Image: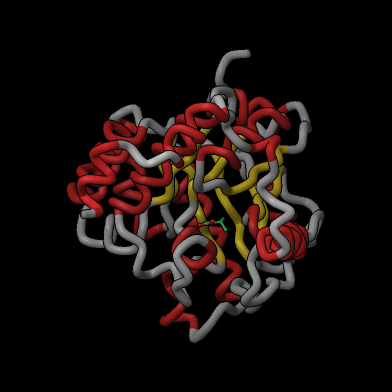
């Protein structure tokens, strides 16, 4: 099976086909998502929170994104892999955005770049798409602006804010994005945006009417112990399963019931017997 392309993602919207997306940050998870048929994988800067334990995504660096994207690229053969531009990589200028994006594309090998923002990043997005780098937009509750928002708060709730979001989406569409993440905005606004734009919308906390949905893999698997965002749903309790497995291991090691012969390497008992019998040299040393 060939790798999913940005154009196929656009066609999925045109055909009314839903577009599921998940994050992954490592090789085994990428392999599992790929085998399950996930069409798009995001190496999001949420890795700062769920993999590194930071309170926000702000400390994540381009080196972090490259490190995790390399692992995901090695694991997923079919999914379209999108790497996130972290805070600081695209705020300075379109030139800096291009430099950092090219570095990620060359060193990690994803098929697309995602960055947060609308009108204010449109010039950078345009430069990237002109350079042949597919770009995914991201508007609404953009976590890199958490300090300006005063917390993880829903966006686009007033007429003014909703109009600003519509302008952001129009600017991203004109700049050539192949998809746009809509994060934590009212469901009815997400529906309106999805109807108005030809670009596939990928929701997270944006209601049921977006063209697709993205979730953080740790949230849906019950692997992030600190908190569960309201917009997610648990499809597994892997944290609990891991804890149970680790407890069973501890108990068996303490009880000497693991490892057994089954996990051990054999040797001719004669060799051991000889090792137990002191040699002349051993006797000389003992004197
Ligand atoms: O970084 C990330 O994982 C994201 C998704 C939550 C959309 O941006």
Residue pictured at 23% horizontal, 39% vertical: 281
Q: Nearer the viewer, residue 253 or 78?
A: 253
Q: In x, y percent, where is residue 151? A: 53, 83
Q: Nearer the viewer, residue 77 or 153?
A: 77
Q: In x, y percent, where is residue 51? A: 50, 61
In the drawing, does residue 77 fall left or right of residue 234? left
In the drawing, does residue 98 fall left or right of residue 76? left
Q: In x, y percent, where is residue 82? A: 48, 40
Kindly give the residue lying farthest to the top in the view shown. Answer: 1
Residue pictured at 62% horizontal, 56% vertical: 216
User: In this rendering, is residue 270 above or below 247?
Assistant: above
For residue 205, say whether it is visible: no
- For the N terminus, which image quadrant? top right
- For the C terminus, which image quadrant? bottom left
In the drawing, does residue 45 fall left or right of residue 123? right
User: In this rendering, is residue 91 above or below 99?
Assistant: below
In which quarter of the view is residue 21 placed? top right
Q: In x, y percent, where is residue 200? A: 63, 40
Residue pictured at 67% horizontal, 65% vertical: 254
Q: Quadrant of ligand 1?
A: bottom right
For residue 241, say whether it is visible: yes
């Amino acid at each position: 099976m060939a790798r999913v392309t940005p154009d196929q993602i656009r066609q999925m919207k045109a055909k009314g086909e839903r577009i599921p997306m998940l994050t992954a940050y490592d090789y085994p998870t990428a392999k599992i998502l790929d085998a399950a048929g996930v069409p798009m994988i995001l190496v999001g800067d949420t890795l700062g929170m769920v993999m590194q334990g930071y309170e926000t995504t702000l400390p994540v660096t381009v080196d972090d994104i490259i490190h995790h994207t390399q692992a995901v690229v090695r694991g997923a053969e079919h999914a379209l892999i999108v790497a996130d531009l972290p805070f600081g990589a695209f705020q300075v200028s379109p030139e800096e955005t291009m430099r950092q994006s090219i570095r990620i594309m060359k060193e990690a090998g994803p098929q697309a770049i995602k960055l947060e923002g609308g009108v204010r990043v449109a010039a950078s997005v345009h430069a990237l798409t002109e350079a042949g780098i597919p770009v995914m937009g991201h508007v609404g509750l953009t976590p890199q602006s958490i300090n300006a928002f005063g917390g993880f708060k829903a966006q686009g709730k007033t007429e003014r804010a909703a109009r600003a979001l519509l302008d952001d989406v129009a600017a991203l569409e004109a700049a050539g994005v192949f998809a746009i993440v809509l994060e934590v905005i009212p469901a009815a606004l997400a529906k309106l945006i999805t109807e108005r734009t030809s670009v596939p919308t990928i929701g997270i906390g944006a209601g049921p009417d977006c063209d697709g949905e993205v979730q953080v893999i740790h949230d849906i698997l019950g692997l992030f112990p600190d908190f569960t965002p309201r917009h997610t749903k648990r499809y597994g309790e892997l944290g609990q399963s891991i804890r149970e497995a680790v407890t069973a291991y501890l108990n068996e090691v303490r009880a000497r019931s693991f490892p057994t012969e089954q996990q051990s390497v054999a040797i001719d008992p004669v060799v051991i017997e000889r090792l137990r019998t002191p040699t002349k040299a051993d006797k000389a040393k003992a004197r």
